Image (tube, helix red, strand yellow):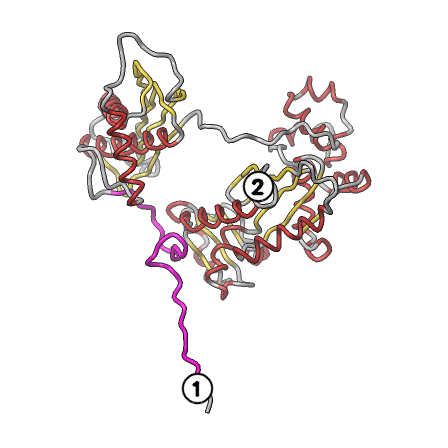
Amino acid sequence: MFALVDCNNFYASCERVFNPNLQGKPVAILSNNDGCVIARSDEAKDLGLPMGAPAFKYKSFFKANKVHVFSSNYPLYGDMSSRVMKILEQFTPDVEVYSIDEAFLQFKGFEHYKLEAYGHDIRNRVLKWTGIPTCVGIAPTKALCKIANKIARKFPKETGGVYVIDTEEKRIKALKWTSIDNVWGIGHALHKRLAQKQIKTAYDFVQLPDLWVCKTFSITEWKLKKDLEGISKIEMDQVKNKRAIATTRSFETTLTDLGDLKERISTFASSCAEKLRRQNSSCHMLVVFLRSDRFKTNTEQYRASTMVSIPFPTDSSLVLSSSAVRAISSIYKKGIHYKKAGVILTGIVPTHNHQLQMFAHEDARHKPLMHAIDRVNKKYNAPKLKLANQDLTLTWKMRQEHLSPQYTTNLKDIITVQCQKKPAKR
């Protein structure tokens, strides 16, 4: 059996944990640079606030409906997510963190457990220890426990936030209840193709012949179909290293000077190198790109990118930074107002298991140097050591006009408890 534990309105719930006055009130969380709405409380959804609503267009809506608006507080959300996942690991060793607010659990050897009661134990412990409300869906497969979770979320009073699909009758009823566009793994394009065949529910989908599904779609859709039939074909994912690593940023103001762009690109390349070393990998290719400000239609538009091959796999900030700086010089065009740039690392291989080169290799001094830099920066939880071509004072900062305190990750923002001395009894 599998379970899907999903945090309810996670970003909004994190804000409510440390600000109880928000309970029962509409809450909206904005994306990077306060661009658009990426999370809403149930109260905000009931008001008709759409996902992805541009913040600047909805200012009057927020004010008229007394919506509490917050900038994305990623340090807080990440820390709260980590706490929830640590709690889930206490219930089973097989946990797949699917996203920041949900995880799959696999119950091997739990045949004699009452899983519905176990689901309530999970939900109650997460709520008690973190203050985050969750819903738990339990079923024989991952696809079915996704549907079970939706049922638990849709009918909280009837289910108590936990729903188990453990009989054939419940499975068929759940599939008939679920529209095809709400099935996990059914995207917009696939939904359109299935609609042409009059497939409206998950139950309609499982009635399709296996051979036809394989020939018309792919093995992925066949696995999904079998999962919905109660035959587990979608396995728990193992933690894998990234195949590409990127650092891309929009600048606070447009840049025109090549020197300023070199500094930014060097910083982006160093950031990528740190991520690379964190997963014990190296790379032998990088892509650098430049973009003008597409919203300034009265200025010349320009976009360019280039790929650089490195003769040996490396995780050195020195090598990657110098390569990126040379690349930016080759695509730079004078007179353009640049708004965005980035570095993407590809050709990633394990650092301690890759093909050696006979005539090209990395400077042996780079490894211990990078190790020392990472150790110092980790100790102070900030990039205290930088390359010489990086600005020591400049850091990229998002526009966050509605940012809440970082209650759990910044000592300056820790909650202050006021205690009053109880008067002595006479």
The kind of residue tagged 2 is Ala
Q: Give the quadrant of the N terminus.
A: top right
Residue at the location (21% across, 35% down)?
390
Occupied quadrant, residue 175:
top right
- Name the mark nearer the viewer: 1 or 2: 1
Magenta residues span 395-423
Q: Secondary structure at mark 2?
A: strand
Residue at the location (36% across, 51% down)?
400
Marks 1,2: beta carbons within 8 A: no
Which sits in the foreground, 394 or 293? 394
Tally the numbered discs: 2
Identify the disc placed on residue 424.
1
Q: In this rendering, would 246 be left or right of 136?
A: left
Residue 323 in the image: state x and y as whole percent.
25, 22
Residue at the bottom extreme?
Answer: 426
Q: Secondary structure at mark 1?
A: loop
Q: Mark 2 — residue?
A: 103
Residue 186 in the image: state x and y as whole percent.
63, 32
The kind of residue tagged 1 is Ala
Q: In this rendering, would 355 be left or right of 316?
A: right
